[in-house]
Amino acid sequence: MARQEKIGIVGSGFIGRSWAMLFASSGYEVSIYDVKPEQVSAALEDIMQHLRSLEKSGMLRGTTLASEQHKCIKGASSLKDCVEGAKLVQESVFEDEELKKEVLSEIDQLADPDTILSSSTSCIVPSKLSAHLTHKANFIVCHPVNPPYYVPLVEVVPAPWTSKDVIARAGALMKEIGQSPVIFSKELPGFGLNRLQYALLNECNNLLQSGILSAEGIDTLIKDGFGYRCAFMGPFEISALNAHGIEDFIKRYGPTVASVTKTFAKPPSWIPEESGTLIEQVNELIPKEKLMERRQWRDMRLAALAKLKKELKEQEASEK
Ligand SMILES: NC(=O)c1ccc[n+]([C@@H]2O[C@H](COP(=O)([O-])OP(=O)(O)OC[C@H]3O[C@@H](n4cnc5c(N)ncnc54)[C@H](O)[C@@H]3O)[C@@H](O)[C@H]2O)c1
C-alpha cells in the first residue's frame, strides 16, 4: 500500500533504478526523472522485469506484490515534477562534479525548504557539491554499494554545514527501507568503504608486483579466506573472537601487527604503463569478453548470499 510520501530520484541509470526499487519496496511514492526521457521508459520496463524475477526467486523486498511496488514508481516529465513535495531527492546522475553541482542547484531551487537533498556520489566530498546551494544545510551524501538491492550498506556523509536533523532523518530513512546506514561524523576523500578497498588493493598490488603471489593467488586468498568471515563480521569482531576479546588480541598480536606493518612498501603506481604484469594477469583470469556474463554471475551470487543472511537473521530472531 502506497504511503503517500514522495521520494524523487534524479538520474535513471543503474543506481537511480535501484533506489527506486528500494523506496518502492517500503511503499514510498517514487518519482524518477532523467534528462533523457527514453531512459525513464527503459528504467520502468527494466524495474518491472527485475521485480517480477525477484518475486519468482523469493527475494522481493517488502510485504507487497511486485505489481504493487511497480505502481509506486512513476516517470516524471520534468525535474520540477520529480522534486516538488518530496521528502528526499536522491541525485544519481553521472559521477561528474560540475554536472552534479548544476543538477543540485536546479533541485535546490525546486525542492521544498525541508526536503533532504542527497547525492549517490561515490567519491566527491559533500562540501564540494553543496557549498553553492541555498539549502546547503539539507545536503548529504548517501553512498550506496553496487548492487544496492543485495548489498545493504549506505555511507551517510554530511558536509560541514549539514544540519543534525538532516543527518538523523537521512539515516532513519535508510534504515526504514532496509539498508544498513553508517553515519560519518565528517567528510573525507573516499569516505570509508573506498578507503578500505584502496588500502587492500595497494597491498594486493604490492604482493603481485614483488612476484610473491600471482593475481590468481591473491584473489584466492581473499575469496577463500579473508572474505568468508567478512560476510558476517567486521575486523574488530574477527580480532576479538581470534583471542579472548579485543584487549587480549592487542596484547597477544599487537606487536606482530606493528612489526609486519613496518614491512609494508609504499603504495604502488596506478598508472597502466607502470603496472607491470597486473593487467595481463587479470585479463587472463577474467577475459574482457566475459565481463558481462561474470557481472550477472556476481549479482546471482550476491543475491544468494543476501538470501542466506536474511534466513539466518530470521532464525536468530526466532531463537531469541
Ligand atoms: N554503478 C556503481 O557501481 C555505483 C555505486 C555507488 C554509487 N554510484 C554513483 O551513483 C551515481 C550514478 O551512477 P550510475 O552507475 O547509476 O550511472 P549511469 O551512467 O548508469 O546513470 C546515470 C544517469 O544519469 C542521467 N543523467 C545525466 N545527466 C542528467 C541530468 N542533467 N539530469 C537528469 N539525469 C541525468 C543519465 O541519462 C543516466 O541515465 C554516480 O554518482 C556514481 O558514482 C555508482
Image: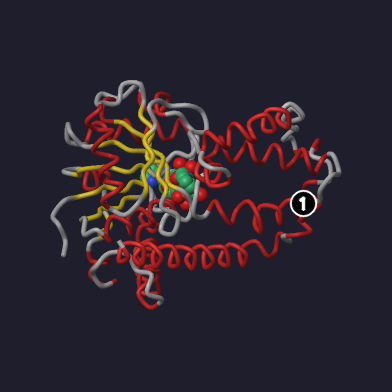
- 169 relative position to 183: left or right: left
Residue placed most toward the observer, 89 or 186: 186
Q: What secondary structure is found at the residue carrying circle 1?
A: helix
Q: Is residue 143 above or below residue 66?
A: above
Write the residue at 25% across / 53% down. Answer: 31
Residue 221 pos. (x, y %): 71, 53
Q: Residue at the right extreme?
A: 211
Based on the displayed image, in which of its 4 quarters is residue 79 positioned?
top left
Residue 93 pos. (x, y %): 42, 43
Residue placed most toward the observer, 266 or 270: 266
Quarter of the picture containing the C terminus is: bottom left
Write the residue at 25% across / 72% down. Answer: 65
Give the number of callouts: 1
- Judging by the rendered image, the residue that carries numbered circle 1 is 215
Quarter of the picture containing the N terminus is: bottom left
Q: Residue at the left extreme?
A: 4
Residue placed most toward the observer, 4 or 232: 232
Categorize mark 1 by other alpha carbons within 10 Å: few (<14), some (14-19), many (20+).
many
Write the residue at 81% across / 51% down. Answer: 214
